[in-house]
Amino acid sequence: MSTTHIKTRARNLQKALSELLKMPIKLSQAYELIAREEGFSNWDTAAARLSPKTPAASPRTIDDFHLPLENTWSPDGFSLERMMKEQPNLEELIRSMSSNNAGLLLISGTTGCGKTSLVEGIMNLLAKSRNQIDITEFPASFSYEKAIQCALRMSPDVLYVGEIVTVEHVRQIHDLLTKGYFVVATTYSLVCGQHQDILLSSIPAWIRPGQGFNSPPEWNQYHIHLRLERKGL
């Protein structure tokens, strides 16, 4: 494999991931993903067998819609109204989502932190400003792709696709965004920012050299990382 081929492959992967995730991706991360796709444990090992990598790109800042939130435990259960009162940035984020068409809301957090309750609350608010909302979960009887296709027959403005688990989920979400839909999804992560690594780890098998990558239209990306806070317990 030539040096030129590796450089081109890494830059294409970096561009594709940056456009998909709506956040800066280092060129060094692209090289690491290529190394794993080629069967190596890391790029240093691969470099000895393939070709040397180029310097990593300089990091840039994340967009304004990256919002860490606390879900304070209450004996009365989950309350989106209480959460918005305690954390006004959430209300501002929901207002922004209500006024935009194409976009991705990704809610990350650990099991039991309240992701599903937060999704339900946000979807109920979005329903007041949207014509049609549809929910698609992974079906046992047929493929995820067919489930998405069935949901699209309802012409939804907002589509909840459940938890991102596989490469196919990432691909379907990207396709929905390029078609102008607003997509809501969840992903498991222990700490704020880990969602990026989770998505990156699922990409290499999808973006292959020679297949190309069509640049998507502009869309807004919103990320909420939810943490359950048990104050006074």
Image (cartoon, rainbow, N blue to C red):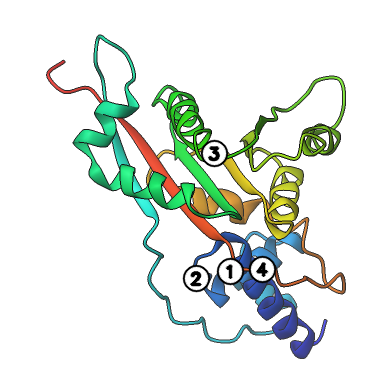
Drawn side of residue 157 relative to residue 191, left or right: right
Badge 1 vs badge 3, beta-carbon distance below 8 Å: no
User: Could you say whether the residue bearing mark 3 is in a helix, strand or loop?
Assistant: strand
The mark that comes first in sequence, 1 or 3, is: 1
Name the residue furthest left. 232
The amino acid type found where label 1 is placed reads Ser
For the C terminus, give its image quadrant: top left
Residue 207 found in image quarter: bottom right
Residue 135 in percent (x, y) is at 66, 29
User: Which residue lies under the disc numbered 1?
Assistant: 18
For the N terminus, give its image quadrant: bottom right
**Mark 2 to mark 4 CA distance (whole Å):** 17 Å
Mark 3 or mark 4, whichever is nearer to me: 4
**Mark 1 to mark 3 CA distance (whole Å):** 18 Å
User: Which residue lies under the disc numbered 2?
Assistant: 24
The mark that comes first in sequence, 2 or 4, is: 2
Residue 217 found in image quarter: bottom right
Drawn side of residue 24 relative to residue 213, left or right: left
Compared with residue 114, is residue 220 higher up or lower down, i.e. above or below? Answer: below
**Mark 3 to mark 4 CA distance (whole Å):** 24 Å
The mark that comes first in sequence, 2 or 3, is: 2
Mark 3 is surrounded, within 10 Å at the Cα level, by few (under 14), some (14 to 19) or many (20 or more) other residues, namely many
User: Could you say whether the residue bearing mark 1 is in a helix, strand or loop?
Assistant: helix
**Mark 2 to mark 3 CA distance (whole Å):** 19 Å
Residue 17 in percent (x, y) is at 63, 66
The mark that comes first in sequence, 3 or 4, is: 3
Mark 1 is surrounded, within 10 Å at the Cα level, by few (under 14), some (14 to 19) or many (20 or more) other residues, namely some
User: Which residue lies under the disc numbered 4?
Assistant: 217
Residue 26 in percent (x, y) is at 52, 73
The amino acid type found where label 4 is placed reads Pro
The amino acid type found where label 2 is placed reads Pro
Residue 70 in percent (x, y) is at 28, 35
